[in-house]
Image: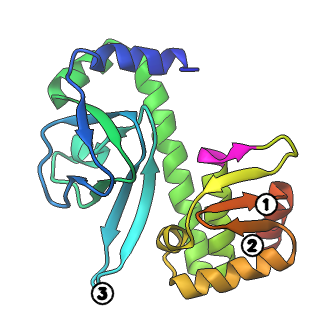
Amino acid sequence: MNTPDQKQLESFFIKYPIRHFDKGQIIIAANETPSGIFYVVSGQIRQYDITDLGADIVVDILLTSSLFPLDWAVRNRPSQYFYQAIGPVKVRVAPLGELESFLMQAPNLLFSLLTRSVAAMTIMQRRMAHLMSGVTLNRVMFELITQVKRVGVRRADGSYSLHLHEDELAQRAGLTRETVNREVGKLKKLGIIEVNHRRLRIRDLAKLESMLDSHL
């Protein structure tokens, strides 16, 4: 169920028409000036950058009620990131000035959005810490835990189901698919996760978190 803050945000964007994007479609390209601030009505959006070597690095996965591109909104310069529909996506787009005027009259909502941004920044900082550690297993475990908490489905037996292919996990961890496959294999041998086609099952999230903490 939507929170009061989400409903308040929806009430502002409802007057703008729905825009549809298909799976894989680029919604905003890097260095492109957007037409406004996008509000995710449904679906998931991949925010990513491309390295000098041509590899995709996933920065974030935007879920329902997310706003983007916030870096453009704050800096008033084109965003450096790509935004791509992971599956079918619906968004609404509002002029930045109108959203700013609305938020100035809704301090509680403004604080909620700030809280979201801080939480996202914390995740990025932790990801950076694991990246700098040079331990590939840490990076894989961190991404698994992050995605389970965001979009994982809890099962009756206490495990979690996660619709995530190893290719996608590799992009989010900044690793090759072969490396991720090797590290996932280690977790499978420990009985922590299972892999079935494009779906992962996290059998023991607490143990996975404990392992990550012990490796720091």
On residue 209, the disc is: 1
Q: Residue placed at 22% from the left, 15% from the top?
A: 15
Question: Residue shown at 37%/19% (left/top)?
Answer: 10
Q: CA distance from mark 2 to mark 1?
A: 11 Å
Disc 3 + disc 2, Cβ < 8 Å: no
Q: Which residue is mark 2?
A: 216
**Which label belongs to residue 195?**
none
Depth check, mark 3 against mark 2: the one in front is 3
Q: Which residue is mark 3?
A: 53
Callout in the foreground (2, 1) = 1
Query: What crowding class fits label 1: few (fewer than 14 Cα within 10 Å), some (14-19), or many (20 or more)?
Result: some
Mark 2 falls on what kind of element?
A: loop
Region of the chain picked out in magenta, as a range: 149-154
Marked residue nearer the N-terminal end (2 or 1): 1
In the rendering, at what x and y percent does residue 104 appear?
Answer: 30, 18
Tell me the element at label 1.
Answer: helix
Q: Badge 2, how many Cα within 10 Å: few under 14, some, many 20+?
A: few
* Residue closer to the observer: 196 or 85: 196
Q: Earlier in the sequence, mark 3 or mark 2?
A: 3
Query: Where is residue 168 shown, x and y percent of the image?
Result: 49, 67
* Residue 80 shown in magenta: no
Give the amino acid at mark 1: Glu
Is residue 94 positioned above or below 158 on the image? Answer: above
Q: Earlier in the sequence, mark 1 or mark 3?
A: 3
Residue drawn at point x = 88 percent, y = 45 percent? 157
Furthest residue in direction front, as rendered: 197
Residue 13, position as x, y percentages in the image: 28, 20
Q: Residues within 10 Å of mark 3 (few under 14, many from 20)?
A: few
Image x and y of residue 216, in percent: 74, 73
Q: Amino acid at mark 2?
A: Leu
Quadrant in which the N terminus appears: top right
Spatial distance from mark 1 to mark 3, Cα to Cα?
Answer: 32 Å
